[in-house]
């Protein structure tokens, strides 16, 4: 799973993932998935990349990824849920300058309202360069995607640019963040922010780093979120002039980006290697970021930080489950792995190594502004471990104390399986996903990548699974 994890007919009404508000004390042993329909000629989900989902209203969802078509060309696809049923998927058409095989990679999807969603990612143009794109939904249609205009110092031929994340604070008011190469003699990796107002995208602007940087700062923004129409945040990292990787937060207020260093916890190494992987915002409140750093013992451990302004306080360490290895080598997958139902009320998850050397998933929750010690991801009896490609990938919390998460683990046969996790009464419980086509595994690149819970009712999930030599998409819930 998830190293950057990565036929058909329309789906009938979906099997419901039980409403969170009435979650039973014992989770069901298994929940059933449905195979996702692909556009005509589609043969599978490219590299298992069905990774992003948003539900702006109950029964109205969009999920996006990449699929393989004729001649093994890779295109973008959007799955459309309407009235609790998944209807015909939409081909996400690449910008007009795309290659015949656009190699479309979808990184992120955000929805401010039904019919007002945005997708971002990368594609290959006719010259063979990799460019960043966004696509704006219009009603139920997805017009052709648009190339992002890169900053004026962008490299020409040889460019490798991508939108890593999109977020919308209101319909038509969105941000896209990502990376590009500059036109230095030896091209350097820079971060950019692009803004949409009234649905129209302005050219991207380079992110000004908060302190002097390395010759190549390897600057990048991995994820963005919005607390309101005028306040959004993006997080990532860069290398400073002392060759230390710093956590980077960019606050975007009324269209103006302001960057700041996020200082690691007090027990950090001098070369802390701080990275911020994921961020979520409470509506009208603070934004919370999760990441990793290296402590004084050389261990890679998790951190959390919150801010409602461009100035971020020093981050705090996140305590792992009892029995973690001295160096737990924490990994955050960087998809939809943090969710906040309100100010000071969030949940997140990822992967760590236990003292016995086995990989496990972890889940951590915050209440009233206090983060509690993480718990080990529960797995079915007989499972061997979370596995080196397992752990928690996706989290959704529509209400305080009521969350869903998606993860993966190794079963007793050594096959990766997808897991739906339910938080109720302060306890996480897991249910294995029964895959379509009686498939035996989600595979190394598949899994449950995204969960969304519109309101406090039923939740929806999407992901991919291995079927023969290819990956197919699946959906959960209604």
Image: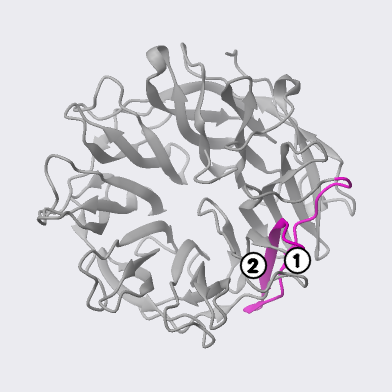
Q: CA distance from mark 2 to mark 1?
A: 14 Å
SS class, disc 2: loop
At x 57%, y 56%, the residue is 337
Image-based side of 101 in relation to 63, left or right:
left
In screen coordinates, is 12 left or right of 229? Answer: right
Q: Which residue is mark 1?
A: 375
Q: Position of residue 80 (x, y in %)?
A: 52, 29
**Quarter of the figure that contains the N terminus:** top right
Please report contact status of discs 2 and 1: CB closer than 8 Å, yes or no: no
Tell which of 78 and 65 is nearer to you: 65
Residue 98, x across and y down, in percent? 23, 27
Task: Indicate whether residue 363 is drawn in magenta.
Answer: yes
In this view, the residue in front, 21 or 364, is: 364
Q: Nearer the viewer, mark 2 or mark 1?
A: 2
Mark 2, residues whose alpha carbon is within 10 Å: few (<14), some, or many (≥20)?
many
Residue drawn 47% across and 84% down?
314
Q: Is residue 434 visible?
A: yes
Residue 387 x %, y %: 69, 49
Q: Label 2, on which residue?
A: 328
In this rendering, would 465 be left or right of 19? left
Residue 251 visible (yes or no): no
Q: Residue at x 64, y 34 (%)?
A: 443
Quadrant of the rendered structure where residue 135 is?
Answer: top left
């Amino acid at each position: 799973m998830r190293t950057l994890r990565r036929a058909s007919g329309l789906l009938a009404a979906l099997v419901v993932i039980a409403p969170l508000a009435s979650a039973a004390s014992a989770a069901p042993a298994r929940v059933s998935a449905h195979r996702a329909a692909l556009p005509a000629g589609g043969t599978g989900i490219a590299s298992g990349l069905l990774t992003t989902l948003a539900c702006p209203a109950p029964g109205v969802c969009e999920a996006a990824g990449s699929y393989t078509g004729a001649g093994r060309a890779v295109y973008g696809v959007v799955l459309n849920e309407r009235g609790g049923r998944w209807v015909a998927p939409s081909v996400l058409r690449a910008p007009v300058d795309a290659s015949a095989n656009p190699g479309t990679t979808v990184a992120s999807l955000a929805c401010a309202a039904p019919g007002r969603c945005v997708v971002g990612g990368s594609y290959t143009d006719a010259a063979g360069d990799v460019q960043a794109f966004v696509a704006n939904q219009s009603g139920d249609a997805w017009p052709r995607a648009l190339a992002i205009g890169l900053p004026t110092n962008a490299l020409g031929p040889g460019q490798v640019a991508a939108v890593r994340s999109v977020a919308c604070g209101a319909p038509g008011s969105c941000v896209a963040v990502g990376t590009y190469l500059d036109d230095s003699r030896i091209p350097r990796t820079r971060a950019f922010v692009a803004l949409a107002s009234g649905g129209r995208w302005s050219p991207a602007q380079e992110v000004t780093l908060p302190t002097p940087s390395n010759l190549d700062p390897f600057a990048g923004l991995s994820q963005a979120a919005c607390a309101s129409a005028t306040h959004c945040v993006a997080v990532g990292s860069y290398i400073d002039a002392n060759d230390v990787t710093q956590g980077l937060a960019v606050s975007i207020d009324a269209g103006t980006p302001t960057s700041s260093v996020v200082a690691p916890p007090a027990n950090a190494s001098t070369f802390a290697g701080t990275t911020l992987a994921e961020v979520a915002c409470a509506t009208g409140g603070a934004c919370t970021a999760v990441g990793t750093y290296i402590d004084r013992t050389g261990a890679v451990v998790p951190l959390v930080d919150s801010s409602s302004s461009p100035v971020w306080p020093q981050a705090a360490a996140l305590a792992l489950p009892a029995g973690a290895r001295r160096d737990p080598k924490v990994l955050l997958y960087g998809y939809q792995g943090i969710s906040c139902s309100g100010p000071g009320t969030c949940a997140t998850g990822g992967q760590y190594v236990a003292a016995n050397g086995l990989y496990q998933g972890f889940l951590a929750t915050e209440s009233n502004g206090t983060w509690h010690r993480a718990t080990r991801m529960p797995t079915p009896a007989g499972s061997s471990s979370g596995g080196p490609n397992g752990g928690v990938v996706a989290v959704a919390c529509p209400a305080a104390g009521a969350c869903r998460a998606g993860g993966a683990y190794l079963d007793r046969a050594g096959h990766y399986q997808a897991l739906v996790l339910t938080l109720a009464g302060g306890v996480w419980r897991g249910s294995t996903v029964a895959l379509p086509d009686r498939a035996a595994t989600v595979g190394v690149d598949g899994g449950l990548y995204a969960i969304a819970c519109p309101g406090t009712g039923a939740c929806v999930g999407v992901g991919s699974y291995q079927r023969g030599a290819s990956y197919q998409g699946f959906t959960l819930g209604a």
